[in-house]
Every structure is written in structure tokens, then in C-alpha cells.
Image: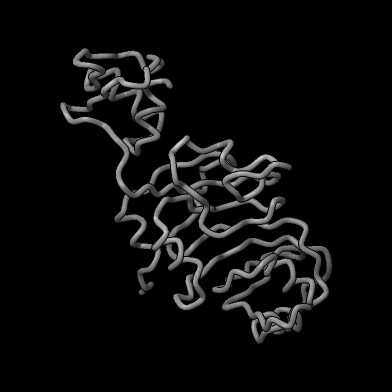
Amino acid sequence: MRLDRYLSNRGIGTRKEVKKLIKQGRVIVNDKVVQKPDYKLSKNDVVKLDGKVVDLPDKVYILFYKPAGYVTSTKDPHAETIMEFLPPIKGIFPVGRLDKDAEGLLLVTNDGQLAHRIISPKWSVEKEYIVRVDGEITENKLEKLTKGVILKDGFFAKAKFVERLSSDTLRMVITEGKYHQVKRMTAAVGLRTIRLKRVRIGNLILPEDMKPGEYRFLTEEEVKTIFEEKN
């Protein structure tokens, strides 16, 4: 693995940031200063930054922009998964799911307790989506979504917040995470979802400058803000 990728995968910074650190002579591999970002590491190499060994933290948190066309799973025998884009860190998994044709914010971690807290309806963590639909978005339909609709399986689902952004696009916030929930809710009021993008989980927002397939590591402090109450 390239040295710059190794450092980036361990949350030291973006590829651009770690390249700068390497060129400054602050990175040592096996007691030797290495200033080439593309230096190839071997399995047993010891990497240090400013004299401290660089290793993975016990808990890993990755903010990932899931592209459409990939399955939200660690493995699938019939389709390409999101793991194609992520670093090969043992034990990481996606928190919740985004449909194969959906895109947007996905949290990937090895912290099962955090994942449960985000997914569980008990904690009511908000998930915000931008939804492009086929059909007329009327005030009556928006009102039905906020008051609640009964889905075909009998589940009563309602949006915590919904607004029309344009003639064919709406913003929807939900706190549950049922299978195909947003698509099924819009279908229940006569709208067909043709594009779905998640832009927020709690207080964690998908960066505007992030592109599909990109990711960055989060600190524990950033993760904690997911559950903070907004003023």
C-alpha cells in the first residue's frame, strides 16, 4: 500500500494533507525518513509520524458518500458493494442501508453500540433526504406525509418534516428506517421516487464538496455531535 494512502486510511488527514506531512519529512518508516508519498509499504513496516507509531484506533468511523449502483453490504455474491471504495479495515460495516439506486451519506464503523443507537427508533435520530419524484407535489400530499400514511405492510409511517423544493423535488426528514421507507411513503401519496439522496444523519451532514465514492475518517468528537440537540 502507498504510504499516503496508509496514513489517510488511519485518519491522519486527506491524501493531500498527508502528502504535505510526508514531504515535510515528518514521517518515518522503519527508522528512516521517507519523503515520497507513493512509497510502497510492506506488511511488517512500522510507520511513525512525529515520532509516534501510526496505527488504527480501536473504534473507526468513516463518513462515506455512497454512489448509486452499489449495494449497502459488506459482501454480496450478485452485486458490487460499497466496500469497493473503502479501506480494507477488518470489522467495519455500514450503519443502516441505502437502496442500491440511492446515493448519499452513509456512516461506516466497527462500533456496534453506536450503530444500534443510530438505527433504533428509540433514539429518533433524524435522517434527511432530497427526493426527486415523478408526479405532482401538492400541499395535500405533503400534509399526508407529515400526518402519516399506512404502507402496504400495515406500517404507519410519517415524516418528521417535509417541504417542496421545486416542482419535482422535496426534502423529507424521517426518524425510522424501514425497508424502502421513503420510496414507499411517496408511493402511498401517488408520487414515484426517481432519485433519492441522503444528506444528513442527526447533525452529521454530507459535505457539499464530497463526490460519490469518496470518504473521510471522523473523530470521536465529530461522531458525538450526531446526537447533540440543536439550539
- Relative to the observer, which residue lies in front, 45 or 51? 45
- Residue 197 in the image: state x and y as whole percent: 63, 56
Query: Residue at the location (73% across, 83% down)?
Result: 154
x, y percent for residue 144 = 72, 84
Residue 111 lies in what quarter of the image? bottom left
Is 32 rendered above or below residue 94?
above
Q: Is residue 222 above or below residue 28?
A: below
**222 w.r.t. 85: above or below:** below
Residue for point 61% across, 50% down: 72
- Residue at 40% in and 15% down: 40
Q: Is residue 190 left or right of residue 32?
A: right
> 117 left or right of 186?
left
- Describe residue 138's horizontal placement relative to residue 90 as left or right: right
Q: Residue furthest bottom?
A: 147
Residue 114, quarter of picture: bottom left
Q: Quadrant of residue 139?
A: bottom right
Give the x, y percent position of residue 230. 38, 72
Up the image or down, 159 lies above or below 211; here it is: below
